[in-house]
Amino acid sequence: MMPMYISSAVLPLFLGLIYIFFYRYMEKPGGRSARRFILFFAFLISALTCLFPKDFYIPFLKSAVIFSHLFLVFGILGKGCFLASTAWSIGGFINACLPQIGDPEKCMIQAEKPAIKWAIGGFAFFTVSMFSGELWSCLVWGTPVIWDDPGLTCVMAAWFFYVGMLHLHLTGAWKLKARTLYAACGGIAVNFFNIMPDTGPFRWPF
Amino acid sequence: MAILNTMSMSIFRKYVIPVWNALGSVRLTILLCLALCLDLIAGYVCLDGNSHIFSPMNETGLQEWAVTYGMNSLPLTAWFFILLGLLFFLSVNTFICTTERLYTLFRARKAFTRWKFACRLAPHLMHYAMIIMLLGYLTSYLFSQVIPFVTLIPGSSCTLPDGSCVISLERFEPVFSDSDRLGTYRNRVIEPRAFLKLTDGNSSKIRMINGKAPLRFAGYNLFLMDFSPKKKGGGMSNRTCIVLLVRKDPGVIFYMTGVFLFSTGLLIYVAQFINTKKDNKEE
């Protein structure tokens, strides 16, 4: 059976693995800031999970279906990739604002490529997660969308956000600064709302 | 007649083409995606703690839900009506944009190899698949036939709406957990197994349903929603009963097709992305 609300506990682990395995690819300008933000996100999500735990860790019978596990695993991979993409975008934006780093446009261009690669990877994983969730819901509850869980709307919001981001990049519809701001600020907001449904009320752990 | 044709052409050029171009614009796509994102986040805020307003939609369908729960709780449900409008515009925008690009692609198909053509086709496949999925959801919510809370005890039966098909509960043989791996589940049902007798006119058969997959019978899908007892000895209630949901959904075929096409397009797109990365590395 699928462990409930565990994604916010496993996500920092995945972010740590990204940090370790992709460390040498983050030597480019903007990469150091991206690394710091990946660590910061991992720390922040760990803290949120400790201080705002969701009590329902007991699995339920209807989750004993392969698609529910695929939904969980691919969802974690997707969220991790989205956070990595956001980290790169923030890194590029901050470097662009600091004149001593270099040409602002060059900083944003150099950060945009890895940000988009992570966004594409995240989009693929997240889509597989969404489809697995829909198949699970169809098999067990008879409909792909169950309106009992508010977290579903956040999943859809994140999906549409990154659909917009990919279209922005592929068509170049907005200016570079606007695109970087969209990816950075929007990424923070959307990923925050994506993680929030897995958290509960404040509980002091000690 | 010629003047009429000329007038029609100028009206066409003056009004229809600009509207067509505006509706198919990529900038509109991005604005719609952003609007959808914001609306869905507002939806999260409204849905949290108020799922009792939205969950009846699973059984009643969209029309009935809209005129009852939807209209009576408008401050909490307005985001859903806005969502429907945005999805409609997104579908129109996607259709126009994709059709135009597909037309250009097909005209130039001889310039590509098969693999390159498939790679170029992949994003369009994903776009059309999304429209098919949305159509599936709409069909499902408008035209599904749902009979919720069909409660059966051993020996009792239920007749389906068509009048000739009958479902009855033969026996309920759950599997109880006897390991300590999940301590909370010790002596509790770990797999509910209900044996149903399905009678269709003169023929009958016995099939098992366990809550992990539907049972298909006479065009309907049967889902095991609840059961009793939940633990050995019965607990508070040792009465044996099951609760089924009976559903006839014409939208399933659409969204399954959409999921398959979208996944195929996504696979080709990701494969192309990885191949391009490899080619760049070799260079």
Image: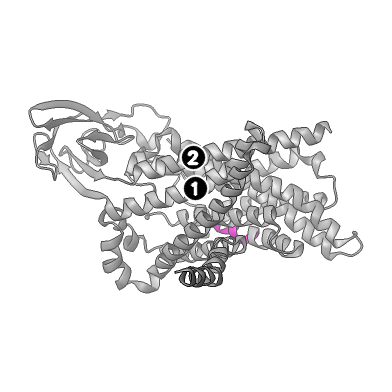
Q: Position of residue A115 (x, y in %)?
A: 72, 50
The three-letter code of the residue at mark 1 reads Tyr
User: Subunit of mark 1?
Assistant: B
Q: Position of residue B159 (x, y in %)?
A: 11, 41
Q: Disc 1 designates what residue? A: B128
Q: What is the spatial separation of the Cα atoms under label 2 and label 1, in whole angstroms?
A: 8 Å
User: Subunit of mark 2?
Assistant: B
Label 2 neighbourhood size at 10 Å, few (<14), some (14-19), many (20+)?
A: many
Instruction: State the scheme by which the image is colored.
Output: one colour
Of the numbered discs 2 and 1, the one sitting upstream in the chain is 1
- At 86% from the left and 64% from the top, the residue drawn is A98
The three-letter code of the residue at mark 2 reads Leu
Give yes or no for residue A190 being in the magenta stretch: yes
Stretch in magenta? A188-193
Q: Identify the secondary structure beneath mark 2.
A: helix
Answer with left or right where residue A40 lies relative to residue B19: right
- Quarter of the image for the N terminus of chain B: give it: bottom left
Instruction: Tell me which corner region of the image, top left, top right, bottom left or bottom right, holds residue B73.
Output: bottom left
Q: Disc 2 designates what residue? A: B261
Q: Main secondary structure of the magenta part?
A: helix
Q: Nearer the viewer, residue B274 or A20?
A: B274
Instruction: Tell me which corner region of the image, top left, top right, bottom left or bottom right, holds residue B274.
Output: top right
Residue furthest front in the image: B1
- Quarter of the image for the C terminus of chain B: give it: top right
- State whether residue A176 is above or below residue A4: below
Q: Position of residue A2 (x, y in %)?
A: 45, 38
Give yes or no for residue B53 being in the magenta stretch: no
